[in-house]
Image: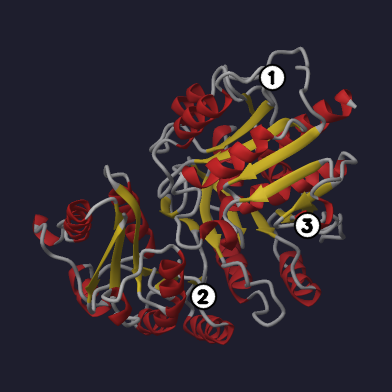
Amino acid sequence: MSVIRNEVRRGVYLDSVALMRIAQSVKALAGVEECGLMMATPANMRILAEANVLSSDGETAGPADIVIAVRAQDAETAVQALAEARRLMDKPRTGPAGDETWMPRSLRIALEAAPGANLALISVPGGYAAAEARKALRSGLNVMMFSDNVPLEDEIALKQEAATRGLLMMGPDCGTAIIAGVPLAFANTVARGDIGIIGASGTGIQEVSCLVSNNGGGISHAIGTGGRDLKSEVGGLTTLMAIDLLDADEATRHIVIISKPPAADVAGKVLARVARSRKPFTVCFLGSASRDVPANARFAPTLKAAAECALGKSIAGAASAAAAPSAAPALRGPRIRGLYAGGTLCAEAQIVLMQAGLSVASNAAVPGASAPEEAATSADALLIDLGSDEYTQGRPHPMIEPAVRDAELARALADPDTGILLVDFVLGHGAHADPAGHFRASFLRLTAGMAKKPVVLAALTGTPADPQGFDEQAARLAGIAILCPSNADAAARAAALSSRAS
């Protein structure tokens, strides 16, 4: 019979990504059935309860505490799992002068240790994030807020205050930035250059910056805005400030703006500001129909097109030796199934498939696509954004933990109608160490003995300089997948194969 044990660490904070990594390490121990480490917010407590790992000890925790919750095969294993979680939480971190036990307990102390700092990256629970951001702004720091679940009124107030102070407020829910060549949060190691990016989408920034870097260009800065910046209520405050900054930056020649369709009034403001610049722009409002843009700008319908506009040349050719043979493979079924770690990559693929005349369903549908429950059995393609809440509640994002894809992969492979499988792998800092390797192992296990397998079309978002190594990840896919030059190319190839088969 399973044993549940909880421990409460009172008045302790660790970033949610760090807690998820620790939980995954503990869960990998023999005899451990489930593990969760979370700040004890009401939402997180519900997640732990639903996962059947919450005990009466854990129920005593408050929102400023961390709950360590494990379910194991026996009491001894549960005790050992708690001890390992404590060890990983208490692992020393390097501080000033090599002091491995030091860590700053406040923003003030951190600034005393690094008086030249000019940016604060904030990743605390949403209920506390605004207060920390105000402290940072009032200390003269630009802010990148990784935290989500921040009230909209706080976002508006913070961005207005940042504007009055001449500071940049990236976020909330800003997962990607590259500032002066330094990748922040989920970002890639790209070449320096003269192309600036402004994005309300983290994986959109990653895809464009990697395509630019891998095709002879480079990035000056990539500024994330947070996903709500182009809503009417926020008014594009960060986007407009980012345009001002990159417009004034002598190192930036061309500016790319990436977002899902903005509110009409905000789009007008942004395009009017673009028109006042002497620099060339690329505007990529994913999911929008082609629209009028100023004379100094070009509209790009996809992330690949945005990279090509910025580079001034087309991106073509095989991504690596794992690319497809020239002959079109025979399909075992008529349907395309897409399993995406990157939400914006999922959106781009939907656009490409619909442009090719296919019907699309998705749990993160762009304009023109259907919800899965409306067209799951009739659509030509079913694309799943595995980063959506229904897949990540109580679990790491699939960019951190590729096992999130495994259940949907098994379902797709078991469906004889699945003839083409679209998959993405997002590399870079913060991402899993070997996402392609994990997929290879899962795919080979699930297809062992299968007479006919679907054709796998893969896209790698990354660079050779990333921690995982682009070429090393490409090699993991050899023999099981066709590696395409970009995410848009993978979707276009899927559409071509599907049309040829029908």
Q: Are marks 3 and 2 in contact (CB under 8 Å)?
A: no
Mark 1 and mark 2: Cα distance apart in space: 44 Å
Give the vertical position of 341 relative to 484 (above or below).
below
Q: Is residue 207 left or right of residue 116?
A: right
Which residue, given by chain and number where applicable, does mark 1 sit on? Answer: 452
Q: Earlier in the sequence, mark 1 or mark 2?
A: 2
Residue under label 3, please give it. 373
Instruction: Give whichever of 278, 8 is nearer the camera.
Output: 8
Q: Position of residue 93 (x, y in %)?
A: 18, 57
Q: Secondary structure at mark 1?
A: loop
For the N terminus, the image quarter is bottom left
| Extreme residue toward the front, this view | 1
For the residues labelled 3 and 1, the Cα–Cα distance comes to 28 Å
Seen at 90% across and 41% down, the residue is 357
- Residue 411 in sight from this viewpoint: yes
Relative to 473, 269 lies left or right: right
Say whether marks 1 and 2 touch (CB < 8 Å).
no
- Pinpoint residue 162: horizontal percent, then vertical percent: 49, 81
* Tag 2 residue: 149
